[in-house]
Amino acid sequence: MKIEQAKITFNCHGTPESKAFDDLYYSNKSGFDETHYVFIEGNGLLENWKEYQNRHFTIAETGFGTGLNFLCVARQFDLFRQANPDHALQRLSFVSTEKFPLTIADLSEAIKNWPLLSKYADDLITHYPIAVSGAHRLSILDGQITLDLHFGDAITSFSNMHVYDDGLVDAWFLDGFAPRKNDELWSEALFLQLARLSKENASFATFTAASAVRRGLEDAGFKVKKRKGFGKKREMIFGHFQQSKKHSQIFKCQHPAYYRAALAKTTQPYVAVVGAGLAGAISALKLIKQGCKVDLICADSKVAQGASGNPLGGFYPQLNAEAGINSQVHIHSFMYAHRFYQQLNDCGVRFEHDWCGVLQLGFNSNQLTRIQKLREKATWPDNLVQYVSAQQASQIANVPLKQDALFIPQAGWISPPDLVRACIDYCHTHQTSEFTLKTNTRLTHVEETRDTCHLSLVETNQEYSAEYDGVILAMGSNTPTSLPPVLPYRLTRGQVELVKESTQSLELKTVICHKGYMTPAIHGVHAMGSTYIKDDTNIEVRADETETNIDMHVSAMQGSDWLSELTMKHLNTQNHNVDSARAAVRCSMPDHLPVVGEYPNIISQQQTLKDLYKAQAPESYDTPSKNCRIMCLTGLGSRGLTTAPILAEIAVSQLLKQPLPMQNELLNALNPNRFLVRSLIRRQPY
Ligand SMILES: Cc1cc2nc3c(=O)[nH]c(=O)nc-3n(C[C@H](O)[C@H](O)[C@H](O)COP(=O)(O)OP(=O)(O)OC[C@H]3O[C@@H](n4cnc5c(N)ncnc54)[C@H](O)[C@@H]3O)c2cc1C
Ligand SMILES: C[S@@+](CC[C@H](N)C(=O)[O-])C[C@H]1O[C@@H](n2cnc3c(N)ncnc32)[C@H](O)[C@@H]1O
């Protein structure tokens, strides 16, 4: 949902000021020196990093503001990595919250003051998120640093963050305006969340020494010390978290069925990714970027032979006027995917795509009502989605259109098989990469033991087994036939047409969506998709589906002469051209959301969670046993280009026990356990 942005002014020192809070974002003397003194020294970060034994360190902050604290830490971490390239600590996560995000113009203006930080600021400015509430993950320094920006109130955001059983945060930066000017933030509810998310011995530092803050932190289980404050400030406080009974109670309040287990490994993890479509290839790339050793296993002789083999696909979110769970998953997946694809491209991973925008036509009365509601409610910011008249839509598309529409300017088209190829090329050529692609290799069984994950595989009729630290199962529509069908998968065949351009149709500049979608002409053809045939897994091209497909486009865009000319020609000639269509099978879920998380252990969980229908408090249930080494990532349905990047990021982050890039409410909606939970609550058979 759209969120209110900060209104700031710059004072005569060039320091940003908030009128609403009547306070400065940082000291007039030097924000840069203040960050170093208060937060970096206050947390003893440099000493802690030297002693740190794990691969990954997490800092969390209240109040992102201009991002100065983040940028200073990013620079310190970069210097640390350059000075200690072989140190165990290799990755940094910075998780920040912001209730009133700065506009991009104000943020750029503020950051201009710090030329030393420009190396890190460029990524931040280029990928700074649109002001929509929820979590936004940015990748900085080619993935060495991850920034999670949670737009919304800090307490709400922290309480909606997933925490592992031994905590999440190593160090806290407690910023946010002065307690006397912002007492809503500095409350007991905040301190309890800090305790809930802290790892044992997590450090904290803050610019203030207000007694209410000191007492609140002590009550929540922190040991608090004082030191001289920055500049003219008399005192500031710092200290560390000491586990307390209260902490374990707070921790238990998470719904046990949605708790996400993770693999804890201090040395390089060896991970198998099964499936070389969009989901598998993007997961492999992300694991390689994290320094893992990866085998990508593919049943076919070549990659991208399943649903991800369609030459062209539309890239856009499915939005409603209400910011319900499905819309939120879509919007966050879309914004993340857009950043991810841009960054891939910027670092030289080239694949065919164009962010030419997508027009969603109000092609029938229901759709027109939907898009009109979206306009009235103004739930989403204009730079994400705009209502346009038929005349404006025609100008944007560069061809005559008869209906009002929604325009999504950042959307467009992508070639899925080219994207898969580019991700795999990246894995092969990445400097430090240990990557193997195993084609003609089929997974037949997977099992988790205490220390490892055991895969049974068949490579060209030869059976063998292999051990890994973890596995990501990304087998698309073959998931239910490859392994026991533990989830309610829905398989739907679809056919997409490749239609030769005409002199009029090659003018089309955007993707057009209605019941189906049509791309502009790319290498002389438009992709026009697609049919939906439930429970049909045959992938031969069918002439009657070509007709269905074409009819669907003609009836949705009635009266468009340019389209009639194109489709008539196609129907007259397509029988002579075997490459004019492709069919594949989608895997989706009954609630139209994909699945990402541990492969469910249904039998054991049915027992542990059998009393769910009694609606007892979450802490009365034990956390069910989990396959923490086996992640499943499937059910991408017809929006794989939009959802695959964030789902892969969730799977990889969870496997490696890092902060997750979405808030709990959305993560729960993607959890493979959700179907079991629903059936237990309704006391229906699973
Ligand atoms: C007709 C059609 C049109 C579509 N249009 C769009 C669109 O416009 N926009 C969009 O975003 N999405 C679209 N989609 C959906 C999109 O294509 C899918 O969501 C996406 O490709 C799914 O990717 P995946 O990696 O999950 O599965 P797949 O691409 O199917 O990959 C599965 C992989 O798993 C491997 N595998 C399977 N079983 C095993 C096993 N036992 N052992 C080893 N390997 C195994 C296969 O070899 C394959 O490599 C469309 C889909 C269809 C069918
Ligand atoms: C002093 S500024 C932070 C400065 C910042 N760390 C920087 O590096 O620029 C305080 C920030 O906290 C934000 N803030 C205030 N109340 C908040 C709340 N309840 N939740 C999240 N952020 C909040 C403000 O909007 C502001 O951006």
Image (spheres, grey):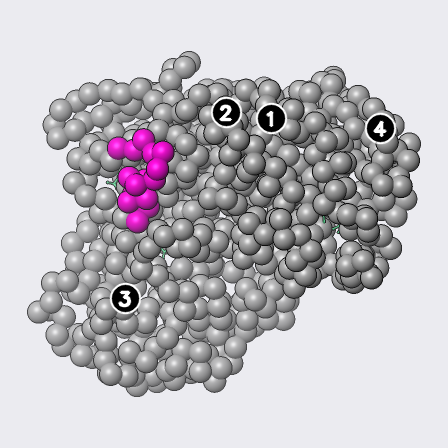
- Asked whether the beta carbons under mark 4 and mark 2 sit within 8 Å of each other, the answer is no
Quadrant, the N terminus: bottom right
Asked whether mark 3 and ligand 1 are closer than 8 Å, the reply comes as yes
- Image position of 328 (left or right of 429): right
The x and y percentages for residue 173 are 72, 36
First reached walking from the N terminus: tag 3 or tag 1: 1
The x and y percentages for residue 329 are 52, 50
The residue where tag 3 is placed is 527
Note whether residue 488 is visible: no
Stretch of the chain drawn in magenta:
422-436
Amino acid carrying label 2: it is His
Q: Give the class, few, some or many, for how many residues have Cα within 10 Å of label 1's Cα (few <14, many ≥20).
A: some
The residue where tag 4 is placed is 227
- Image position of 658 (left or right of 517): right
| Distance CA(mark 3)–CA(mark 1) | 51 Å
The x and y percentages for residue 239 are 77, 25
| Label disc, if present, on residue 87 of the rendered structure | 2
The residue where tag 1 is placed is 49
Element type at marker 4? strand
First reached walking from the N terminus: tag 4 or tag 1: 1
**What residue lies at 49% left-to-right and 82% top-to-bottom?**
392
Element type at marker 1? helix
| Distance CA(mark 2)–CA(mark 3) | 49 Å
Amino acid carrying label 4: it is Arg
Q: Give the class, few, some or many, for how many residues have Cα within 10 Å of label 2's Cα (few <14, many ≥20).
A: some
Q: Nearer the viewer, mark 2 or mark 3?
A: 2
